[in-house]
């Protein structure tokens, strides 16, 4: 096959993003000048404490909450764990032991729910249908007298579907149930307003919006129960011990501010390019878009191609300078393909042939066309010697 | 990519012996779509020698590389040698496979055995069925793959 290495297109922004220059610039003084421990009483420590407070206030402003409702964590997974364990602890206290979530949550949520199941909680995972969406009505129907917590992600990391968080928040409020949302994929492209959505807990991860890795946020509404997962010092008002990752936190605050400030501009850039990519890939025979056509993140494109396997597809695209991901079992070392693709009704053999392209606003029309052409060629090539393809469409 | 050796990537990028043999003397197909890999191997056998082998594979990089290497290893060899080909030999020839990909090499070994069984059946040749029994390697827990 012809290999073109001149192109280099990073289309895996749902996995992680490149650190923004603004975030990097904000972080640098934390290593060399503001290197103190924010818990220290001396000058350099107090400078660090000021920087920490400023970052907390800046993030609170973006989310429309109080600075005291922001807890810094190591990232989205920790925030998800802490939110669920906290909601469950509140439920246990009230004698309510049912938790409602969806079949397409991130494993940080699903595996924590498995753990809670072993502790005696009952977990209801709502089906999402082929569009990959849940409705507030579904949530309301599932809520019973025993329900303590609802956890529904704002946007899905694989198929990019956007859930009706505001409506679900209103339902939870009406029934006196705690509500958590994993908003890790949403920051930067969707507006996040914790007052409007009525969430009690919200998880964010800096590296998904061009901030640094290893830093995240848990928003916990004032009065919502918060369990401590990491014991030790009194950092984060005793709810998360450990010396704060100041460079990470400062970088995250800068990245979030930049992402929110440029959100509308970025979305306006992304939407037509996403549409071009979807329309181009849809022309490949026996391809199908995964996730709702409209209720999806502006940078998310996810397709299945019958008769090909995702890992082969990724390796050949990488040879052509295109960096993407797949829900194929082979790419993760798991036995089954992505639980999200199975939940939207894709059969195993089709789910193995999935390709996720998550684009950033700096992508050009020319690059999108190059992706479309490359995917078309690679899919046709792999099909040319695929016994599965011959069996089904030969 | 550091996941695979140079050899694996070479056989994945430039697979040898891709295709179909019309009027093959033996054809073997193993794996299943649900698990994400299907391997089909075609053999041309003359005077007990494998004169040609071709493959078609639906699967990951290591499945394609394993098919390619396995066909390379048996072309020109007597049937008895092809029958003795182990997945270990395929792995070694590829300069290793990651632990969770070893089952791809098992598929290659089995596809060849199935093709030889088909050859014996078609030509009415008596054989010991024991070494030719398919073992269900697909969809087993991970440690089962690491053999």
Image: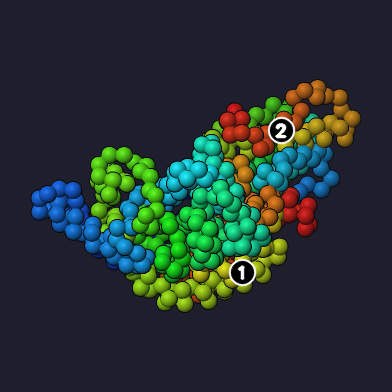
* Callout 2: SS: loop
* Residue sitting nearer the eye, A278 or B119: A278
Q: Residues within 10 Å of mark 2 (few under 14, many from 20)?
A: few
Q: Residue at x 35, y 43 (%)?
A: A228
Q: How is the image coloured?
A: rainbow
Residue B65 is situated, as x and y percent measured from the top left of the image, at 60, 43
Q: Which quarter of the rendering shows the N terminus of chain A?
A: bottom right
Q: Residue furthest right?
A: B124
Q: Residues within 10 Å of mark 1 (few under 14, many from 20)?
A: some
Q: Measure the C-alpha gap from mark 1 to mark 2.
A: 39 Å
Q: Which mark is residue A293?
A: 1
Give the answer, above or below, for where A270 lies relative to A185: below
* Callout 1: SS: loop
A164 lies left or right of A72: right
Give the answer, above or below, for where B101 lies relative to A325: above
Chain label for disc 1: A
Q: Residue at x 84, y 31 (%)?
A: B120
Q: Which quarter of the rendering shows the C terminus of chain A?
A: bottom right
Give the answer, above or below, for where A246 lies relative to A11: above
Quarter of the image where one finds residue B50:
top right
Q: Residue at x 78, y 52 (%)?
A: A391
Q: Which mark is residue B136?
A: 2
Camera sees residue A207? no
């Amino acid at each position: 096959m012809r290999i073109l290495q001149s192109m280099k297109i990073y289309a895996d922004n749902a996995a992680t993003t490149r650190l923004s220059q603004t975030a990097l610039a904000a972080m640098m003084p934390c290593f060399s000048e503001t290197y103190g421990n924010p818990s220290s009483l001396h000058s350099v420590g107090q400078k660090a404490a000021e920087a920490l407070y400023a970052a907390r206030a800046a993030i609170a402003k973006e989310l429309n909450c109080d600075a005291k409702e922001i807890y810094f964590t190591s990232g989205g997974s920790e925030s998800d764990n802490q939110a669920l364990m906290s909601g469950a602890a509140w439920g246990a206290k009230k004698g309510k032991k049912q938790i409602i979530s969806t079949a397409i949550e991130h494993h940080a949520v699903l595996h924590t729910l498995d753990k809670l199941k072993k502790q005696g909680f009952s977990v209801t995972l709502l089906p999402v249908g082929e569009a990959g969406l849940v409705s507030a009505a579904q949530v309301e129907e599932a809520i019973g007298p025993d329900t303590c917590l609802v956890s529904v992600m704002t946007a899905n990391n694989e198929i990019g579907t956007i859930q009706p968080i505001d409506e679900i928040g209103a339902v939870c409020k009406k029934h006196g149930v705690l509500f958590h949302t994993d908003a890790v994929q949403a920051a930067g492209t969707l507006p996040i307003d914790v007052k409007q959505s009525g969430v009690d807990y919200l998880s964010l991860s800096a590296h998904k919006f061009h901030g640094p890795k290893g830093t995240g946020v848990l928003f916990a509404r004032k009065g919502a129960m918060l369990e401590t997962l990491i014991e030790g010092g009194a950092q984060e008002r005793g709810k998360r011990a450990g010396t704060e990752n100041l460079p990470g936190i400062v970088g995250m605050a800068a990245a979030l501010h930049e992402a929110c400030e440029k959100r509308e501009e970025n979305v306006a850039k992304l939407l037509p390019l996403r549409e071009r990519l979807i329309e181009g890939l849809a022309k490949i025979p026996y391809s199908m878009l995964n996730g709702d056509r409209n209720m999806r993140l502006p940078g998310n494109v996810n397709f299945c191609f019958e008769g090909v396997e995702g890992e082969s597809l990724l390796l050949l695209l990488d040879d052509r300078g295109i960096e993407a991901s797949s829900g194929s079992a082979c790419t993760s070392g798991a036995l089954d393909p992505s639980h999200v693709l199975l939940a939207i009704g894709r059969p195993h053999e089709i789910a193995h042939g999935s390709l996720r392209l998550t684009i950033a606003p700096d992508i050009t029309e020319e690059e999108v066309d190059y992706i479309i052409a490359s995917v078309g060629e690679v899919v046709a090539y792999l099909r040319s010697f695929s016994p599965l393809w011959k069996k089904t469409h030969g | 990519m550091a996941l695979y050796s140079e050899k694996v990537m070479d056989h994945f990028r430039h697979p040898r012996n891709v295709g179909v043999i019309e009027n093959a003397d033996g054809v073997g197909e193993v794996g299943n779509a649900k698990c994400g890999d299907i391997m089909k191997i075609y053999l041309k056998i003359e005077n007990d020698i494998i004169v040609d082998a071709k493959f078609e594979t639906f699967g990951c990089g290591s499945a394609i590389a394993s098919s390619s290497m396995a066909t390379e290893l048996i072309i020109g060899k007597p049937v008895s040698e092809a029958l003795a080909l182990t997945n270990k030999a395929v792995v070694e020839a590829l300069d290793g496979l990651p632990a969770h990909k070893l089952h791809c090499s098992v598929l290659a070994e089995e596809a060849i055995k199935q093709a030889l069984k088909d050859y014996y059946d078609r030509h009415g040749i008596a054989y010991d069925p024991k070494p030719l029994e398919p073992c269900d390697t697909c969809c087993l827990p991970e440690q089962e793959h690491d053999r």
